[in-house]
Amino acid sequence: MIQLSIQDQFDGTTKVQDLREAIGQEFSDNYSSTLRSKLISVSADGNHCTVDEVTAYGKKPKEFGKRRPSWLIWNSMFF
């Protein structure tokens, strides 16, 4: 998958900025053990995000500070 910073330059979108503005928001996350995560940070280059699992649906989080590709998080939050 193409990195978001390159995609933003190529097609003029602002997906990295969208993610930076969404820091602190919870979102549906199929890769989380609770199916919910919270965006903690976006890397300086915009190509990776850090997320924490949050308590949801009666399940307790198992992972914190998980690093994931920014395109995956953007798709989870905005697509």
Image (cartoon, rainbow, N blue to C red):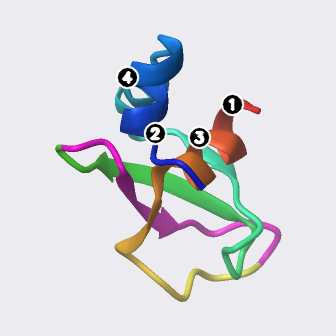
Pointer 1 and pointer 3: residues touching (CB < 8 Å)? Answer: yes
Q: Looking at the image, is mark 2 or mark 4 earlier in the sequence?
A: 2
Q: Residue at x 45, y 17 (%)?
A: 14
Q: Residue at x 53, y 48 (%)?
A: 2
Q: Secondary structure at mark 1?
A: helix
Q: Secondary structure at mark 4?
A: helix
Q: Residue at x 51, y 39 (%)?
A: 25
Pointer 3 and pointer 2: residues touching (CB < 8 Å)? Answer: yes
How far apart are the alpha carbons under marks 2 and 4?
10 Å
User: Residue tagged by mark 2?
Assistant: 4
Q: Looking at the image, is mark 3 or mark 4 earlier in the sequence?
A: 4
Q: Secondary structure at mark 2?
A: helix
Pointer 3 and pointer 4: residues touching (CB < 8 Å)? Answer: no
Q: Amino acid at mark 3?
A: Trp
User: Residue tagged by mark 1?
Assistant: 78
Q: Going by the picture, which residue comes out furthest to the front?
A: 10
User: Residue tagged by mark 3?
Assistant: 74
